[in-house]
Image: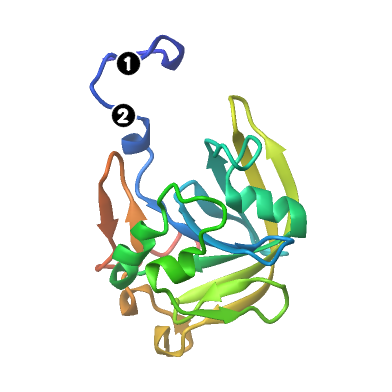
Amino acid sequence: MFYEPKDGHGLPHNPFNAIVTPRPIGWISTRGADGQDNLAPYSFFNAVAYVPPQVMFASTGAKPDREGTKDSVGNIRETGVFCINIVEFAARDVMNRSAGPWPRATDEFTDAGIAREACRMIDCPRVAGAPAALECRMTQIVRLEGEANFLVLGEVMGVHLRDDCLIDGRFDVTRYQPLARMGYRDYAVVREVFAMPRPGE
């Protein structure tokens, strides 16, 4: 099968999200200029540079109460900061709850019963007990092709690591089992890891 996205695929569900998998989930916490906290998962998320450490996430779609975008991007526009919380398998249900199309006034931490802690370097909450959290300063918001598609880039200013995830000086993902997004309504969990040295190492 071959199709051009502009012409449609003719399938009952869009296969694009199922092709680019698995995708890590960035659980983005923000605080608006009005002090309203927000927490939402984004699977268009990744690290993009080492020095200085930088990350990205993309927001697609809009809410009627957010002027052409979603709460996360709206808050970041106002404050210039955000925190990326890493999602573990054990948090799958509350993460999913925070993905709902809630009104701007909804505090997802409270709604889903998620404990929060203050970030150290930015005025923003983070998910208490997350395996890792990255405190970020927004460097760019790039408008992408299409309606309500935005790419948010940020520099990591502070890193939180949960103590039980540090084994022999390494951040060990098998200690918390990262949750990943697949296509459609499917997710995956990382339970097995193997090493392959690069040629020349």
Q: Position of residue 29 (x, y in %)?
A: 56, 64
Q: Secondary structure at mark 2?
A: loop
Residue positioned 46% across, 13% down in the render: 6
The N terminus is located in which quarter? Answer: top left
Q: Nearer the viewer, residue 155 or 195?
A: 155
Q: Furthest-top residue in view?
A: 7
Q: Amino acid at mark 1?
A: His
> Is 9 rendered above or below residue 88?
above
Q: Between disc 2 and disc 1, whose residue precedes?
A: 1
Q: Nearer the viewer, residue 120 or 98?
A: 98
Residue at x 76% of width, y 54% of height: 78
Place of residue 84 in the rendered image (x, y in percent of width and height, measured from the top left)? 56, 64
Query: Looking at the image, can residue 114 be seen?
Result: yes
Q: Which residue is mark 1?
A: 9
Q: Which mark is residue 110?
A: none
Q: Is residue 175 above or below residue 193?
A: below
Mark 2 Cα-neighbour bin, 10 Å: few <14, some 14–19, many ≥20:
few
Q: Amino acid at mark 2?
A: Pro
SS of the residue under disc 1: loop
Image mark count: 2
Label 1: few (<14), some or many (≥20) within 10 Å?
some
Identify the residue position indicated by label 2 in the image: 15
List x then y, in percent, for residue 119.
64, 78
Task: Please indicate whether residue 42 sits to the left or right of residue 174 in the image.
Answer: right
| Residue 193 occupies quadrant | bottom left
Tell me if I can see residue 86 in this picture: no
Indicate whether 62 appears above or below 29: above
53 displayed left or right of 109: right
| Marks 2,1: beta carbons within 8 A | yes
Q: Position of residue 133 (x, y in %)?
A: 54, 73
Q: CA distance from mark 2 to mark 1?
A: 8 Å
